[in-house]
Amino acid sequence: MHWFYLILAGLFEVGFTTCLSKARTAIGTEFYLWGGGFLVFLTASMYLLYRSTEAIPMGTAYGVWTGIGACGTALVGILFFKESADIWRLFFIITLIGSVVGLKVVSST
């Protein structure tokens, strides 16, 4: 169950970074909606990261959490915001995913 919490925390990290990016360019009510989304996703992500560390070592949990967030945010940027998808960027995203999977494989929990 703790690994599920950790994966969900990483996905919420993607949500809060996306909201932060959108709030940066928004004005008026739209700014407050993106800012509110940021706070909701941030709170959920931190809580789930905290819960996951009840059974998963902090170094492993943090590495996996940031890896999911970094990969997910980069993929959201590519798929929804027309960011670059050159071969090197994709290579390093795949390398990062491999590192996250590796941390899960060598973890004792």
Image (tube, rainbow, N blue to C red):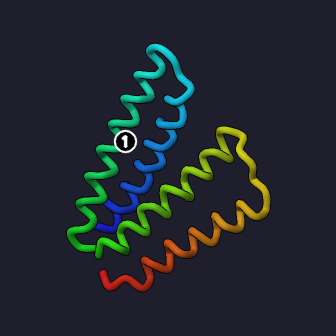
**Quadrant assignment for the C terminus:** bottom left
**Residue 88 x %, y %:** 75, 64
Residue found at x 23% / y 73%: 55
Between 46 and 11, the residue placed more toward the observer is 46
Is residue 35 in view? Answer: yes
| Rendered image quadrant of residue 87 | bottom right
Position of residue 79 relative to residue 38, above or below, is: below
Position of residue 26 relative to residue 56, above or below, is: above
What residue sits right under mark 1 in the picture?
Answer: 41
Residue found at x 62% / y 52%: 75
Mark 1 falls on what kind of element? helix
* Residue furthest right as drawn: 87
Residue found at x 61% / y 52%: 74
Q: Amino acid at mark 1?
A: Phe
Residue found at x 48% / y 37%: 20
| Left or right: 101 in relation to 52 | right
* Residue furthest top as drawn: 28
| Left or right: 10 in relation to 43 | right
**Residue 15 x %, y %:** 45, 43
**Residue 14 x %, y %:** 48, 48
Mark 1 neighbour class, 10 Å CA radius: few under 14, some 14 to 19, many 20 or more: many
**Badge count:** 1
| Left or right: 38 in relation to 82 | left
**Residue 40 x %, y %:** 33, 37
Is residue 1 in view? Answer: no
Position of residue 61 relative to residue 70, above or below, is: below
| Rendered image quadrant of residue 104 | bottom left
**Quadrant assignment for the N terminus:** bottom left
Between 79 and 70, the residue placed more toward the observer is 70
| Rendered image quadrant of residue 49 | bottom left
